[in-house]
Image (tube, grey):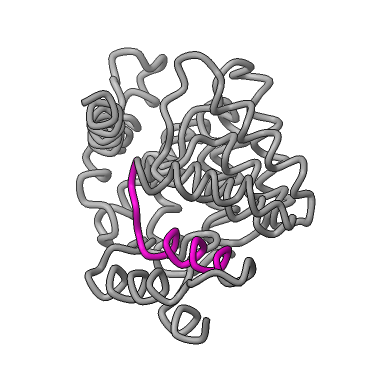
Amino acid sequence: MEKFQRYYLSFLLLIVYTNTIAQVNCNAVEGEDCKKACELYNWASDLQGSRESQEGFDKAIELCPGFSNAYMEKAVPYLKNGDFVTWKTLIDKAVAADPRMHLGYRGWCKFEFLRDYKGSILDLEELRKYYPEDLGRSLNGDYHLDVVRAMSYSALGQKEKATKIIETLLVTRGYVKGLYDHYQLGVTYFELGKYDKALENFEKQSKEYDFADNIYFKSKVSKIRNKDYLDLKMLALKTYDEGKHMKDVYTHHFNKVYRKQMEKL
């Protein structure tokens, strides 16, 4: 029941976040031009991706050049369409106008879309100046931003540092685990050759939320230890075919495993 409540809470928080992030209380905005810009922004946000929406953001920026949300939302369609150059130009303006609001988002996107691990770390460590106790979560709700920071260090070869960050987070009072925390920690330990710690985390992941990628790594540990691994391999393939694997609408998860990799084990 406790596990269900934790993930249900995470899901609710994600729904609330994604449904409210675009809207701004214009009564709290100072200056008549900026209030008008805010109203335009709220209208344009509901039409995100359309020409009318982008033109609305442009008008909002003309009225109030310091209105950071307009840059941020104008940038989103470029990110989704793979025009990262235009996205970065716009999101950099949003961060310059309000780093407290947009550093976490830019840091997450650098990690998830651009694979700019150094840039992601710089943004997230800069964000800690504003939120020293809790950096918050990734836009899709899957990860705490400290886990994103850890995965970035892992990608850059600093795997011991990555494990320490996640281990510390997992024992932090009040911390709500993400969907893949133990999996990412397990993969990092696996890459370090610490198979006991890796398997311990893969087993914990299985108890909380299991999926093909996690089962695949358990089979890899078994194979390395000269134990029967074929049943786990077949289970990983079956689970993958059932659609229970790491997936994202716009990009690919860090440490995602593909079916062809499972077949070759």
Q: Position of residue 43 (x, y in %)?
A: 21, 40
User: From this viewpoint, which residue is outermost toward the front?
Assistant: 227
Q: Position of residue 93 (x, y in %)?
A: 58, 43
Q: Relative to 12, is 89 on the left or the right?
A: right
Quarter of the picture holding the N terminus? top left
Residue 170 visible in the snapshot: yes
* Residue beneath the point at 54% across and 44% down: 200
Q: Is residue 14 above or below residue 159?
A: above
* Residue beneath the point at 38% across and 26% down: 33
Q: Is residue 202 above or below residue 13?
A: below
Front residue of this view, candidates 233 and 127? 233
Number of marks drawn: 0
The region drawn magenta spans: 208-222
Q: Relative to 75, is 40 on the left or the right?
A: left
Front residue of this view, candidates 251 and 87? 251
Residue 90 visible in the snapshot: no
Magenta: predominant secondary structure element? helix
Q: Relative to 46, is 246 on the left or the right?
A: right
Corner quadrant of residue 248 = bottom left
* Residue beneath the point at 55% across and 18% down: 172
Q: Is residue 230 above or below residue 114?
A: below
* Residue beneath the point at 63% across and 45% down: 197
Q: Position of residue 85 (x, y in %)?
A: 59, 64
Q: Position of residue 250 (x, y in %)?
A: 38, 64
Would residue 250 be counted in the magenta stretch?
A: no
Q: Is residue 246 above or below residue 72?
A: below
Would residue 215 be counted in the magenta stretch?
A: yes
